[in-house]
């Protein structure tokens, strides 16, 4: 079978399935990614680069769509020489969010095109209008509606799609949901487990150990979409109430979602200026190697995860797999994973008092079985479960052609 994988930042969310496919002698595997993509050892990668930037003279609502057309055109030009030499993929698995697959059905009309359908934008009822601190204007809502033109074309072009969670599936138009399967790509749950002897060496020379009052927070970047502003505004009260508590924060200063602050270099600077904290107790580690990240989760007494109604982070599932006591926001993506009082705790996203109270109670007492319940839930999102679902979707498994298993 000839399989073509496409992701702007290859491997991205396709890492696990790519790692699996590259070991199979019956698979002829090729990948396409942007010129800046990290790539994956053992997988041949063709790199593309759009030949120009979108025009600043175009209507602002169309800027992202023209950018997508340019990406799609660049991928088409990259693959056309192979097609001229007879290359024909049987299946294309792609993240279409940047437009790469827009024209592939014209080049490979007989290939089965499967899209990773991560998100469909809504002006109301999801992330865009969620936070009153950052109100959505009418212009912003119109821009989002125009932005969905790309995603509607992606849904129309695809033979099938896969959404990581039921909530993400529910965001897509009803007319297309029947061809969208629900299957999480999987986390390396087998690498994540509690370690009562875990130690974390901090940059200031201090060592934190499992069993201490340690609160952890992790995000790719520290920004409002992941509740960083709520967390930072709750910290002064938490630190006053819990004098032995140490806080470890992992994440970069860039912007993954939303916008940077207008009055500071990044959200960390802005929120520290507004909410000064004791740097001997609050430790910003930035982006860390995976081994350090694992130790952060292993020494954690309470792990805080907050998010807008948006895509669910791997870090939440990885914290659960590590046996962390979870305090999370009561938002749509979390309700699919967390059962309040069973495998974690849910609090209102904007309720800082409730957040502090719940973290304090979690630091003070251990609910029997809650950590193991969290681990049990995380295992349902494990790597092998994800690989089985993707193999079936690609037509490689014993249940090929059937719906992928829906994970709850």
Image (cartoon, rainbow, N blue to C red):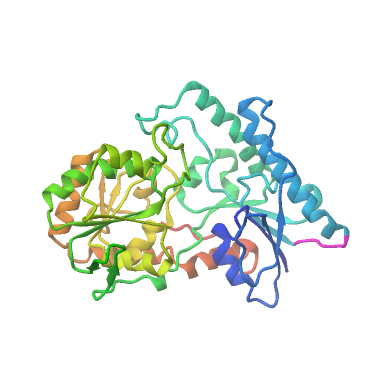
> Is residue 109 in sight in this rendering?
no
Q: What residue lies at 70% left-to-right and 75% top-to-bottom?
A: 26
In the displayed structure, does residue 364 sit left or right of residue 206? left
Horizontal arrangement in the rendering, residue 281 relative to residue 126 (left or right): left
Q: Which residues are magenta?
A: 85-89
Q: Can I make out residue 366 in this image? A: yes
Considering every residue shown, the one lying at the far front of the view is 204
Is 55 or 175 nearer to us in this picture?
55
Q: Would residue 206 be counted in the magenta stretch?
A: no
Q: Nearer the viewer, residue 66 or 150?
A: 66
Where residue 182 appears, as percent x and y from the top left, is 51, 54
Residue 324 x/y as whole percent? 28, 63
User: Residue sitting at 44 percent across and 58 percent down?
Assistant: 407
Q: Is residue 388 above or below residue 168?
A: below
Task: Using the rendered view, name the quadrant where residue 111 is placed.
Answer: bottom right
Q: Please identify the dominant SS of the magenta region.
A: loop
Image height of 203 relative to 345, above or below: below
Q: Position of residue 352 (x, y in %)?
A: 22, 40
For image coordinates 25% across by 65% down, the residue present is 371
Front-lying residue, 300 or 204: 204
- Percent coordinates x, y for residue 401 in the rendering: 63, 61
Q: Quadrant of residue 380?
A: bottom left
- Near-viewer residue (361 or 158): 361
């Amino acid at each position: 079978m000839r399989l073509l994988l496409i992701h702007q930042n290859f491997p991205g969310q396709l890492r696990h399935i790519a790692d699996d496919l590259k070991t199979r002698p019956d698979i002829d595997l090729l990948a396409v990614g942007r010129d800046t993509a990290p790539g994956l050892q053992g997988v041949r990668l063709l790199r593309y680069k759009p030949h120009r930037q979108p025009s600043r003279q175009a209507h602002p609502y169309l800027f992202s769509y023209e950018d997508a057309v340019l990406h799609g055109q660049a991928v088409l030009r990259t693959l056309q020489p192979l097609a001229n030499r007879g290359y024909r993929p049987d299946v294309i698995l792609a993240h279409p969010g940047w437009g790469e697959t827009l024209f592939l059905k014209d080049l490979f009309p007989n290939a089965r095109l499967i899209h990773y359908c991560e998100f469909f934008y809504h002006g109301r009822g999801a992330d865009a209008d969620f936070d009153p601190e950052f109100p959505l204007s009418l212009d912003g809502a119109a821009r989002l509606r125009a932005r969905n033109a790309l995603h509607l074309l992606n849904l129309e072009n695809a033979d099938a799609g896969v959404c990581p969670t039921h909530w993400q599936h529910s965001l897509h138009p009803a007319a297309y949901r029947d061809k969208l399967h629900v299957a999480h790509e999987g986390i390396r749950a087998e690498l994540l487990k509690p370690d009562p002897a875990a130690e974390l060496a901090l940059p200031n020379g201090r060592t934190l150990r499992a069993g201490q009052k340690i609160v952890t927070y992790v995000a790719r970047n520290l920004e409002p979409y992941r509740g960083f502003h709520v967390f930072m505004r709750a910290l002064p009260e938490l630190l006053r109430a819990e004098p032995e508590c140490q806080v470890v924060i992992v994440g970069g200063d860039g912007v993954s979602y939303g916008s940077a602050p207008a009055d500071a270099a990044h959200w960390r600077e802005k929120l520290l200026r507004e909410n000064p904290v004791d740097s001997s107790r609050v430790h910003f580690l930035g982006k860390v190697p995976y081994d350090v990240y694992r130790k952060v989760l292993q020494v954690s007494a309470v792990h805080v995860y907050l998010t807008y109604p948006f895509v669910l982070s791997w870090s939440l599932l990885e914290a659960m797999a590590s046996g962390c006591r979870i305090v999370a926001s009561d938002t749509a993506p979390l309700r699919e994973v967390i059962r309040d009082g069973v495998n974690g705790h849910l609090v209102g996203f904007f309720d800082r008092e409730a957040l502090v109270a719940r973290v304090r109670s979690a630091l003070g007492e251990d609910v029997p079985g809650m950590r193991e319940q969290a681990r049990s839930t995380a295992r349902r999102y494990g790597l092998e479960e994800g690989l089985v679902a993707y193999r079936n979707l690609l037509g490689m498994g014993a249940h090929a052609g059937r719906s992928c298993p829906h994970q709850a």
